[in-house]
Image (spheres, grey):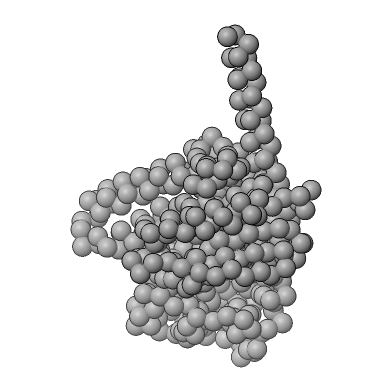
Amino acid sequence: MNKDLRIAFFPDSYLEVNGAAMTCKRLADYARDNGLPFLVFHAGRKTERTENGSVIHYSLKRSPISFPLDEELAYDPLFQRHTKLVLDELLKFEPDVIHITGPNDVSIVGAYIAWKLQIPLVGSWHTNVHEFAAQRLNKLFRFMPQKIRSGIVGFAEDKILSGAVLYYKMPKVVLAPNQELVDLLGKGTERSSFLMGRGVDPERFSPKYRTVSDGKIRLGSVGRLRAEKNVRALVEIEKQLIAQGFTNFEFLVVGEGSERDHLERNLKNARFTGFLEGEKLSEAYANMDIFLFPSETDAFGNVAQEAAASGVVPIVSDKGGPKYLIEHDDSGFVARNIDEFVQFTSLLMSDADKLGTMRSRARESAMSKSWNSIFEGVYAAYRESIRIAELRRNAARNASSASQGRI
């Protein structure tokens, strides 16, 4: 049935380096590998059309007045100038479903055209924008008294979340990366809500890439070094480990961002690699023993799953999506606060047998996550959106016929 579906995809993040962009590209790869007709519109450095098997990519250039939102991600107030080009391409492609992601310039064009052409619309949530914004506002206003700052940040977070939920009322079917968000969006939008998790490549992320054998325990961190990732928690974790007498360890920090300078100045036993990709990233993961992910804003947490596939024990926060990836005290740990991050880390550093067992369990757990099964679920959501649209059309026709019969 998938082969009958023609999908037009409008991701807000595609060429950037982050988990959401990686997932969007994986979805296009799934369509290509299975010969499914798939049209992707995304922002790029220039406007051009390319084809890769059954997938058509349309890169749309942003204007000079675009402004940055996060790292490479930007917003172009003039992006709708591409609407006619997109509309012409869609009329030729004849999609059955249009799929949008977050409230960004690219997806807004897709949502408008879906409404204009009356094409079933599916929306997927990839980023907890309300929590990201709250973290940054908290940092921006840290000169204020705690009570006042908390009030401002809390108010802003609630309003941004309400706006995001309102945006996701446009699709008739919504997708989210963890059950907490599935429930929130289903209730808030009164739409059909499905889980769209993320898979991992067990060949790309594997213990086979390990190159160290010096007996030193490596505590890993991978991702953007930004305030919303709560990476300053690593400094406090190190302080408590040193206070407990641990010395034979090293932080291996992979990534770039505005918090790197703070970490370099305050972590005593750390090596910074900067941004890595390909086999160098695979090697870095595999050389870790324990993966520390204190972020409280991630909707999913790809890096925790990649670490687990590499045979590394992840310790994650109990806030956000990563906790759904972990079976506590089996394939990893879920920590409620900094003290618990330290507690679980010191436990593993003190017990080589437990560390070895949990490394194996982390790998086994990650290998059970299949990209194919995830995207089969996405196509099921596409079919559901078509079914809902057909029901609405039938209801409208019946109402019209009944009205004419009364005249």
Location of residue 63 by image quarter: bottom left
Location of residue 131 by image quarter: bottom left
Q: Position of residue 99 (x, y in %)?
A: 59, 51
Q: Residue at x 67, y 34 (%)?
A: 390
Q: Would residue 80 be visible to someone looking at this image?
A: yes
Q: Position of residue 8 (x, y in %)?
A: 61, 54
Picture layout, residue 132 above or below residue 95 = below
Q: Nearer the viewer, residue 277 or 234?
A: 277
Q: Nearer the viewer, residue 128 or 36?
A: 36
Question: Is residue 278 shown left or right of residue 30?
Answer: left
Q: Residue at x 27, y 63 (%)?
A: 140
How many numbered tags mark residues here? 0
Q: Position of residue 354 (x, y in %)?
A: 66, 71
Q: Position of residue 198 (x, y in %)?
A: 63, 60
Picture layout, residue 148 above or below residue 230 = above
Q: Would residue 127 be visible to someone looking at this image?
A: no
Q: Residue at x 64, y 24 (%)?
A: 397
